[in-house]
Image: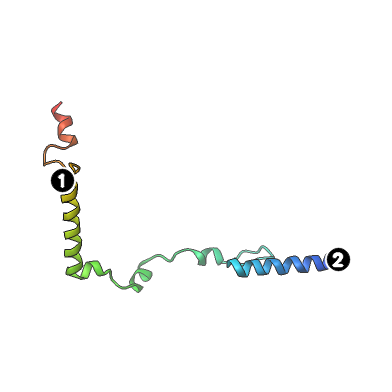
Amino acid sequence: MSLKGMLMAAALQGVTEARARIFGHVLNPLGKRSPHKILRKKLIGEKIASWYPDDIKNEDPSVLAREEKERLAKLEMLKRRGKGPPPKGQGKRATKRKK
């Protein structure tokens, strides 16, 4: 291999390493199997779920009350526009049976 070819290969390797550092890629010049693909996946399972704190919605009654109030307000707005749910027994399925 000539000197020019060696310099070109070294420059190309340096560019490849820099690109990997900048974009957060894993450099694998030999093409061997690595565990990176497995480690990159999201963690799953009971052990992982137990690590995170419980959801605040399930604990705090004020949050539950606020969400219920928001739901009722939205339902009221939809009813005023005529887009709310129909009274019981007058929905799509009930009208299909009557025909």
Colour scheme of the picture: rainbow
Q: Quadrant of residue 97?
A: top left
Near-viewer residue (76 or 91):
76
For the point 24% across and 67% down, the residue is 57
Indicate the position of residue 3 as horizontal and vertical percent values: 87, 68
Residue type at numbered disc 1:
Arg
Horizontal side of 27 relative to 1 (left or right) equals left
66, 90: nearer the viewer: 66
Task: Please provide percent x and percent y for residue 59.
Answer: 21, 70
Q: Give the labeled residue for mark 1.
A: 80
Q: Which of marks 2 and 1 is nearer the N terminus?
A: 2
Circle 2: element type: helix
- Taking 88 as reference, is 58 above or below it? below
Disc 1 element: helix
Horizontal arrangement in the rendering, residue 3 relative to residue 73 (left or right): right
- Residue situated in front as seen by the camera: 63 or 56: 63
Q: Of the numbered discs in the image, which one, if any, rests on residue 45?
A: none
Could you tell me which quadrant the C terminus lies in? top left
Residue at 27% of width from left, 68% of height from top? 55
- Quarter of image, res 90: top left
Q: Residue 63: x, y in percent?
A: 20, 67
Residue at which label 2 appears = 4
Q: Residue at x 88, y 66 (%)?
A: 2
Viewer-nearest residue: 50 or 66: 66
- Pair 2/1: label in front: 1
Kind of residue at disc 2: Lys
Would residue 66 appear left or right of 18 to someone viewing this image?
left
Q: Please identify the quadrant where the N terminus is shown.
A: bottom right
Name the outermost residue toward the right.
2
